[in-house]
Amino acid sequence: MLRGQLTLRAGDFLLDSGEFEIETTGVTALFGRSGSGKSLLLRAMAGLDPQTRGHLHFGTERWQDGRWRLPASCRDIGFVFQDAALFPHLDVRGNLDYARRRAPGVTVASMVAIAEEVGIAHRLDQDVGSLSGGERQRVAIARALVSRPRLLFMDEPLSALDWGAKAELLGLIETLAASTGVPILYITHAPLEVERLATRVVFMAEGRIERVETLRDALARPDSPLFDEEGPVSVFEGELGAPGDFGLLPFNTPGARLWLVGTPGRKPGAARLRILARDVALALDAPGRASILNQLAVTVEHIEPESGGRVTVVCRLGDGQRLLAQITAWSAHTLALAPGMAAFALIKSVALVD
Amino acid sequence: MIELFGASISLEPIWLTLQVAAVTTVILLLLGTPLAWWLARTRTRWRVVIEAIVALPLVLPPTVLGFYLLIVLNPNGAVTQFLRGFGFEGQLTFSFTGLVIGSVLYSLPFAVQPLMHAFESLSERLLDAAATLRAGTLDRFFSVVVPLSRRGFLTAATLSFAHTVGEFGVVLMVGGNIPGQTRMVSIAIFDHVESLAYTEAHVLSAMMLVFSLVVLTLVYGLNRRFGVKVG
């Protein structure tokens, strides 16, 4: 648990977080536009800036109190920077060893094990200058993990990478978060990364923390900042099954089964599925023969006010999960949609979050 | 005394010069490093003033600096009297100590500027990374700053040494020309020329010339080698 209130000035920009309380389990995403103060907040939380003021507790430990600041070196944290920040005078092994020698009780064997898990074991004796962008970030992640942090900060670790490396690393971070159990504070301005990784979202705007909520709650708000780009989205957690006829993949979530196509090579297992609200249509009668694969029985819970000729309809599946549908205001009016009505959601497309 | 090319050369000035230069270099690295670090990192307005003061010996005639030092360090002056209170005997002017003090001040910019540039070009991010890996302030300095600034240290040390070897005005003012005590090579050459002993002056001058050339070649060579590795 991180509790406190921090201020930090950088040039003309003022970070004034306001009082906050952030549960630190799993992955917490720090989300906001560029220039909203995410990085500054992370630096202030990590104790990297001596100009930080305010107060901060991690659990029962005091990290910041007015001008007094527990140095970053004493906080048992890890930090992965946007540009990896590898030591250029050391090779890959040297970078990891730098962390190992300063972390109590970390053996060379466990360091190598981490290098293997992160996928850089074959690069240990290489110069850091010879690594690709993705490899540099892997080394940075491995180095942070070797130091056995109690809390891992990540400042847009994927932003400098190309599309392929991004996808790979996102998967790696997801795996590591689960396998190491280290709580992560993760800065991003990409809604997809939030939907993929986060259990909790801290929304920032203009140097303030606007709101801290679970991903589920964040996605249930049709006005969530996560939806600024593509409109409202519903995210389902479930299990991906084995592919069947016609390349159809079943996705099982409590209360519904959805079908996917066109994701070859995807291994069965836990997955998250996202459905754009604008890809969901509503029908009051059970549709007869239709080409739409995914049709779910839902109950209309709530209709958001109109904006731009469209309304967002919050629906519930049998088990209580929420599905957002965006339809024209005209349709909502013609169908006389009202809370409590039974309807069928016709989903034009679903996509795995990855 | 040695015989070289028909000239009898006293080794004392050479030995003294090397000693003064070595001590000066060590002191300059010890003093210059924190000063350069502070200058590279501080955001205070006073920075420009301090930088100007450090750079003064570059433009000031050495005799001016030497003259002021002579005044400040004179045996009846406050500084000497203050040191006497701590049991200091002897005097600051016309002595080895005086030579070193003068050389340190005169060569200060040659130590501070390369170090400052090295520290300025160091990415702050790397120090942050080291801090989050549990490295404290001193640890960060020796494990990140020093190895990444070794070109700066190399340049600072060599220039301080070479510049001290080559100085004339300050040492003449502060140290005088006492054979075996404060007569350094540059002054010895001046002496030889004054007394029309051109052969001796030739030999000593040629030695200085070769020495300077070798030192500079070495620095540029090493810089080049390290440069490839660091960049």
Image (spheres, coloured by chain):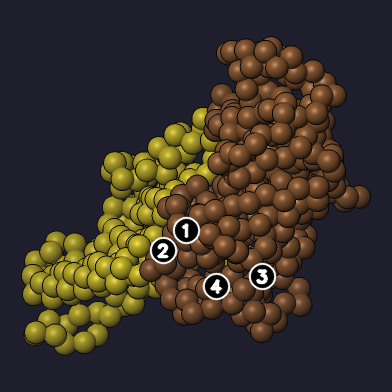
Chain colours: A brown, B yellow
Badge nearest the viewer, 4 or 2: 4
Q: Which mark is residue A165?
A: 1
Identify the chain of the residue marked 1, using the numbered disc in the image: A
* Circle 3: residue type: Val
- Position of B203 with respect to A164 (left or right) is left
* Circle 1: residue type: Ala
Instruction: Name the residue carrying label 2.
Output: A132
Q: Secondary structure at mark 1?
A: helix
* Res B20 seen here: no
> Residues at marks 4 and 2, common chain?
yes
Q: Are marks 1 and 2 in contact (CB under 8 Å)?
A: yes
Instruction: Name the residue carrying label 4.
Output: A119
Q: Earlier in the sequence, mark 4 or mark 3?
A: 4
> Residues at marks 1 and 4, common chain?
yes
Residue at image x 74%, y 66%? A180
Q: Residues within 10 Å of mark 1 (few under 14, many from 20)?
A: some
